[in-house]
Image (cartoon, rainbow, N blue to C red):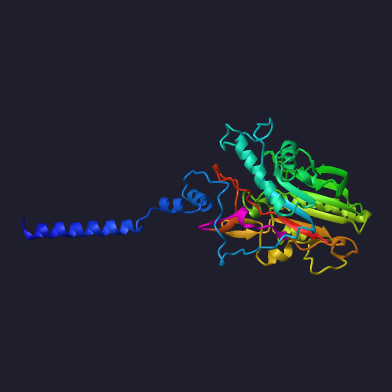
Amino acid sequence: MDKKAYLSIAIAALVGLTLFLLYSNGYFTKKQDIVASQTPEAAGKERESMAISTKRSAEAAPEPMAETEQQIYDEPIKPDVQKVAFYNVENLFDTVDEPGKDDEGFTPKGVLNWTKARYQTKLDNISKVVRGMAFPELLGLCEVENKTVLKDLIKHPDLSKEKYRFVHYESPDKRGIDCAFLYKKDIFKVEDSEYIRINFPKKIVTDYTTRDLLYVKGQYMGKELFHIFVVHWPSRRGGPEASEPKRIYVAQQVKKKIDTLLKKDPNANIIVMGDFNDTPANKSVADILKAQSPDRINAQTALYNCSLPLFKKGIGSHNYKGEWNMLDQIIVSKSLLDNDGLKASYTKVYQKKEITFYHPKYGLMPNRTYSGPNYYGGFSDHLPIYIELD
């Protein structure tokens, strides 16, 4: 064997040894192996970006929030202070296919494999959040399917002792999701309630239905009359600008009802809470409702957005690809800020470690139940919000 052959063999052996040592030390670890070494939450989201269908454990702890993350917010819960809260619970469906609703996916045989076990996990998670907020006296919800899921929720072992009751109406939304209002029966007495149906003019949209607005009137603590609106405005599907006319139209219907109430009683206690699918700065909220900052109360302004101060600080309730936005908001009338009775605080976001996870690309995000067909066993794609009444 000539020298060139010996040299080739030696080089090949050296290269092989080098590759072996590098691989042994993890230098050539595949991206799938990196995903597998993460917590289930981070791994699930990373697999989503790699288009690999997977499951994520509901019980596993999420990644801790990085100190450099965009949204660092940890407001301590005051258990002895009365609260009004709102939570978009992200598709709280039972496991039964209901005629007339687009809920086939949320069945055991559906594309989402929505089993009784997964449904129970969803109820467990929502109950855990309500308990974590120290059981708000009043609680608005959206993306609930029907009365069955609400009955199951308030009967949950974590909530049953709180004596929650609810107001709910079936709406024509094609997804089969509605708004609901939960209240502690010893605190709040319902006097009247109604749904406000949204019928869009053809110039805005045709063949489109959305969630009804929910209105509830009742006595709070036997002392003050409250007017409560729970809303879930049309989504941004198709783009924020293209879909904006629908949200503006819905805002106009809310404003008409509020104007009627304030005409009868200029000091009416009004609370509008929900998922607006718009920020406090968008036209539907800022220009139509004319909800202003609560730090500047004046005689000309009827409504104040308790969520605006956090929004100005870059804090949000929803994260889309790393961008936080305050889509969930609580708006109150002036009487709840400057009268001698109950006074509303600024909005607070319930952002605890167990209901978030750390996405390797987008940072801290709400720990959701599904993303597409991928089941993660989390809580919701929104964070809950609340105000305190003192």
x and y percentages locating residue 15 in the rendered image = 23, 59
Is 2 a magenta residue? no
Place of residue 60 in the rendered image (x, y in percent of width and height, measured from the top left) = 55, 50
Q: As drawn, is 265 to the left or to the right of 44?
A: right
Look at the image and tell me whether residue 106 can be seen. no
User: Quick one: quadrant of the C terminus?
Assistant: bottom right
Q: Position of residue 73 (x, y in %)?
A: 65, 63
Q: Which residue lies furthest to the right in this view?
A: 264
The residue located at (24%, 58%) in the rendering is: 17
Going by the picture, which residue comes out furthest to the left? 1
Is residue 215 visible to us here?
Answer: yes
The relative height of residue 202 versus residue 361 in the rendered view (above or below) is above
Instruction: Please tell me in which quadrant of the rendered image residue 326 appears.
Output: bottom right
| On screen, residue 217 above or below 353 | above
Residue 191: image location, x then y, percent: 90, 45
Q: Nearer the viewer, residue 336 or 187?
A: 187
Stretch in magenta = 348-361
Q: Does the magenta segment cover residue 356?
A: yes
Q: In which quarter of the image is residue 299?
A: bottom right
Which residue: 74% across, 57% down?
Answer: 386
Residue extending farthest top: 99
